[in-house]
């Protein structure tokens, strides 16, 4: 009996990963290849789509070789990419310039202008500031600053759209990317034309995809040219993919309300699904149909979480790095051993995890990190633990805001770097008094894309059925300690009180630093 396998492609900020899975979610092959990010000016970030393609070809061949499978055993593939990474191109996919990466914030003036319109569709932005990361800001920047490229662009493709076109020859938009970052709502007519016209983009519509497809929808087969380059079979079904983090939700098996996806790395991203059309000042969304038809997606985030822990390790743990290297140990395991015996609350330390500002719930890029309560008793382990606790307080604050807006959250499903630390997860569980589930396969975006591929390939009838059969979790959940939860409540409350008490002072400090930086640069 012939094996049936599916392929999940996960194209992130630094590399493209290809995972090959059987229909029970077991990974049988994996390949990863990096590509370069270019930084022409401060705040700019670009990538070359041609490098995306060559990296995909390389990763695919690595994964196929490791799996030992044949191209005839592959019944489908799908993909996810970074979102609001925009490629101005010709109808045949030829890029006119390097892509504007999702993290590119050159369009900050356009974002301020768009925010000032107070248009009704800004409800998806929490009725607040539009981030320059979003597609409409990047498109307006192109029109204002590179008018010839904008005019000559027959298509404005998101990264996932470009990959899809290169694979199938069909130009589609994903319901995932369009509702998540393009202000699209299919029940309200699709792209909000009045909004785009009001900001000066009335000529953009011919450049955007006409066919907006649901995740997992069979959109075509691999072209002969794409199949030959990738080493796959011509006509292999391709499923509509979308946003990397949203496919990660599927890879965590979240297809119904009540479950919180916590995707961790340099930052924390929090997502949950809801049956309600909810919009609030401290949350993003609800984005309709972005993951599962009929459900809205609600989002919150913390700008610097894993990156702050890495900052602490890099600057204050040189001795432990030497010890870890000599003993062939993980430095974070050594840090956790130091911190595990520190009591909850780190003996009076309160940290604000604002090293890169606050994304949610305050949407404030002008605040910075703060450590309060230091005494001569406190040492490195106290500060390390207090940083983990601060991140957990921030996550808890966002969970509280979800609940305040009528969105119930009963369990957490976590993936990413934080899941490598049982102590870090335990602190999260204790602060929020909530159970945390950890998947067996931490490559949840790859798995999520493979789940979509299984639907297009006909193995399962829908995303829900596929996820139920392909996602598995570690047997032991991280359960909260009632005693520790009670101890944490006063500290978490102090954390929540700190922003309204200190943000003006932090703004002043940030401005002083910016002014001094300009002074030093000029003199």
Image (cartoon, grey):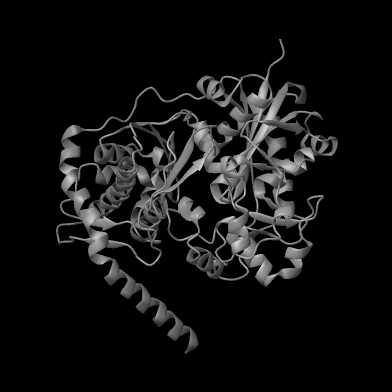
Quadrant housing residue 174: top right
**210 lies left or right of 506:** right
Q: Does residue 71 appear in the picture of this structure?
A: yes
Q: Position of residue 296 (x, y in %)?
A: 48, 38
Q: For the point 67% across and 61% down, which residue is it?
A: 202
* Nearer to me, 281 or 304: 281
Q: Position of residue 253 (x, y in %)?
A: 48, 28
**304 lies left or right of 348:** right
Q: Position of residue 125 (x, y in %)?
A: 46, 54
Quadrant housing residue 167: top right
Vertical comparison of 73 with 45: above or below: above
Q: Residue furthest bottom?
A: 523
**181 lies left or right of 262:** right
* Nearer to me, 62 or 500: 500
**508 lies left or right of 296:** left
Q: Residue furthest right?
A: 224
Vertical comparison of 346 with 426: above or below: below
Q: For the point 65% across and 62% down, which residue is it?
A: 201
Q: Does residue 38 appear in the picture of this structure?
A: no
Vertical comparison of 51 with 418: above or below: below
Q: Position of residue 199 (x, y in %)?
A: 59, 64
Q: Residue furthest top?
A: 1
Q: For the point 34% across and 35% down, which residue is it?
A: 408
Where does the N terminus fall, quadrant-wise? top right
How many numbered dots are placed on residues in this image?
A: 0
């Amino acid at each position: 009996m012939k094996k049936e396998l599916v392929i999940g492609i996960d194209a992130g900020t630094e590399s493209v990963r290809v995972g090959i899975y059987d229909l029970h979610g077991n990974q049988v092959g994996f390949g990863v290849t990096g590509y370069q990010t270019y930084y022409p000016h401060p705040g700019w970030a670009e990538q070359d789509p041609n490098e995306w393609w060559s990296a995909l070809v390389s990763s695919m061949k690595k994964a196929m070789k490791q799996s030992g499978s044949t191209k005839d055993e592959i019944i489908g593939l799908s993909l996810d990419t970074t979102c609001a990474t925009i490629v101005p191109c010709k109808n045949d996919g030829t890029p006119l310039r390097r892509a504007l990466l999702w993290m590119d914030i050159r369009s900050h003036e356009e974002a301020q202008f768009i925010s000032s319109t107070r248009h009704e569709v800004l409800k998806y932005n929490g009725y607040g500031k539009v981030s320059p990361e979003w597609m409409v800001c990047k498109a307006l920047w192109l029109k204002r600053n590179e008018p010839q490229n904008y005019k000559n662009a027959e298509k404005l493709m998101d990264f996932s759209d470009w990959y899809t076109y290169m694979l199938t020859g069909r130009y589609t938009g994903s319901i995932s990317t369009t509702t998540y970052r393009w202000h699209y709502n299919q029940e309200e007519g699709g792209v909000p034309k009045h909004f785009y016209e009001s900001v000066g983009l009335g000529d953009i519509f011919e450049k955007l995809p006409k066919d907006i497809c649901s995740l997992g929808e069979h959109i075509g087969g691999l072209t002969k040219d794409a199949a030959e380059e990738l080493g796959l079979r011509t006509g292999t079904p391709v499923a509509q993919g979308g946003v990397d983090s949203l496919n990660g939700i599927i890879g965590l098996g979240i297809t119904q309300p009540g479950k919180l996806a916590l995707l961790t790395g340099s930052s924390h991203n929090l997502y949950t699904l809801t049956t309600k059309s909810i919009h609030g000042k401290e949350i993003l969304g609800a984005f309709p149909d972005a993951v599962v038809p009929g459900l809205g997606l609600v989002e919150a985030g913390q700008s610097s979480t894993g990156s702050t822990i890495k900052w602490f390790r890099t600057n204050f743990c040189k001795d432990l790095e030497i010890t870890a290297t000599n003993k062939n140990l993980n430095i974070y395991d050594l840090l956790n051993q130091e911190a595990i015996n520190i009591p909850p609350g780190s003996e009076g330390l309160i940290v604000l995890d604002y090293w890169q500002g606050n994304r949610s719930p305050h949407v404030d890029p002008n605040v910075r990190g703060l450590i309060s309560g230091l005494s001569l008793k406190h040492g490195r382990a106290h500060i390390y633990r207090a940083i983990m606790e601060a991140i957990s307080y921030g996550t808890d604050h966002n969970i509280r805001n979800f609940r305040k807006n009528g969105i119930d959250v009963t369990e957490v499903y976590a993936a990413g770097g934080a899941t490598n630390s049982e102590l870090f997860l335990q602190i999260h569980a204790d602060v929020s008094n909530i159970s945390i589930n950890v998947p067996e396969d931490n490559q949840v975006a790859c798995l999520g894309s493979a789940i979509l591929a299984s639907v297009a390939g006909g193995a399962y009838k829908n995303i829900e059925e596929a996820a139920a059969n392909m996602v598995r979790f570690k047997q032991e959940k991280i359960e909260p300690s009632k005693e520790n939860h009670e101890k944490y409540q006063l500290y978490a409350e102090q954390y929540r009180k700190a922003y309204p008490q200190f943000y003006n002072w932090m703004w002043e400090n940030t401005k002083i630093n910016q002014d001094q930086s300009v002074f030093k640069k000029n003199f």
